[in-house]
């Protein structure tokens, strides 16, 4: 059974011809496109976007997020440093939320996609592929990099009146990461991936 992601209407799975697609009987939303076993372009495109996102994510975690010049002194911090500062200032709940939604869950999502896509691009079956795919679909809604970037931008606007604000490399990387995550998510088809897991050697 398929459940429509727009209206939650249940419908039976049907076999699709090459190049065909299935749409919801109630609202017309696209449910699935037919998977061509010989065409690996979709997997390779999603893999390329995921690898690019992983590189940006590593850079974003390693470099300063923002710098502040105030009264002749310069201060900058990485995302990890910001989480540590929040923890030390007894904002443990906020620190945990920031670490989970902007560091842990995006790392797990990128790792799961690479775990699935790298072997599939080579025509092999990834180990524990079904379990990893289920986990990926479960954690995907909880990654909130875009919310974090929006919060940082709001804070920068407010701080601009009292200090010179210098956006760091990490902030630009997080901005690019939002678009790469969106592109990878749009390119990633769970039904096609499940089908490829079934037919892979």
Image (cartoon, helix red, strand yellow):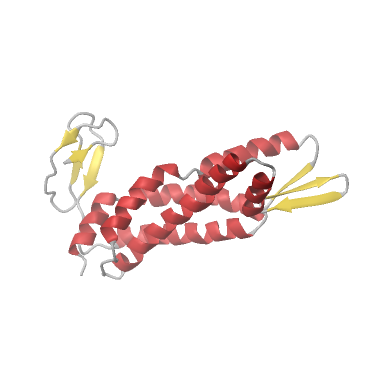
Residue 2 picture quarter: top left
Residue at image point 26% right, 35% down: 29
Vertical comparison of 49 with 150: above or below: below
Q: Quarter-wise, where is residue 5 in the image?
A: top left
Q: Is 187 above or below relative to 9?
A: below
Left or right: 9 as drawn, with respect to 169: left
Between 76 and 179, the one nearer to me in the picture? 76
Identify the residue at horizontal 49%, vertical 52% (top origin): 104
Q: Position of residue 92 (x, y in %)?
A: 61, 42
Residue 34's x, y, as percent? 19, 51
Question: Which percent across, then down, holds residue 124?
Answer: 26, 70
How many numbered marks have been drawn onto this rendered protein structure? Answer: 0
Rendered view: 85 above or below 150: below
Residue 70 lies left or right of residue 77; in this view the side is: right
Q: Does residue 39 appear anywhere in the picture?
A: yes
At 53% from the left and 57% from the top, the residue drawn is: 57
Give the camera-side residue of 100 and 35: 100
Q: Is residue 188 visible?
A: no
Q: Position of residue 200 (x, y in %)?
A: 21, 66
Q: Nearer the viewer, residue 128 or 192?
A: 128
For the N terminus, the image quarter is top left
Quadrant that contains the C terminus: bottom left
The relative height of residue 187 versus residue 51 in the rendered view (above or below) is: above
């Amino acid at each position: 059974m398929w459940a429509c992601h727009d209206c939650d209407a249940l419908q039976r799975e049907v076999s699709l011809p090459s190049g065909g697609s299935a749409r919801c009987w109630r609202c017309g939303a696209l449910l699935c496109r037919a998977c061509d076993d010989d065409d690996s372009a979709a997997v390779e495109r999603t893999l390329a976007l995921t690898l690019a996102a992983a590189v940006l994510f590593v850079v974003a975690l390693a470099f300063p997020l923002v710098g502040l010049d105030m009264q002749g002194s310069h201060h900058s911090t990485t995302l990890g440093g910001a989480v540590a500062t929040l923890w030390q200032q007894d904002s443990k709940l906020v620190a945990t939320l920031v670490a989970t939604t902007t560091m842990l869950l995006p790392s797990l999502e990128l790792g799961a996609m690479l775990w699935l896509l790298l072997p599939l691009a080579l025509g092999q079956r990834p180990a524990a592929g079904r379990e990893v795919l289920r986990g990926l679909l479960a954690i995907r809604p909880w990654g909130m990099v875009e919310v974090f970037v929006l919060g940082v931008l709001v804070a920068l606007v407010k701080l601009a009146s009292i200090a010179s604000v210098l956006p760091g490399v990490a902030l630009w990387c997080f901005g690019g990461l939002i678009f790469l995550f969106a592109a990878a998510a749009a390119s990633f088809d769970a039904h096609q991936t499940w089908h490829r897991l079934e037919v892979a050697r």
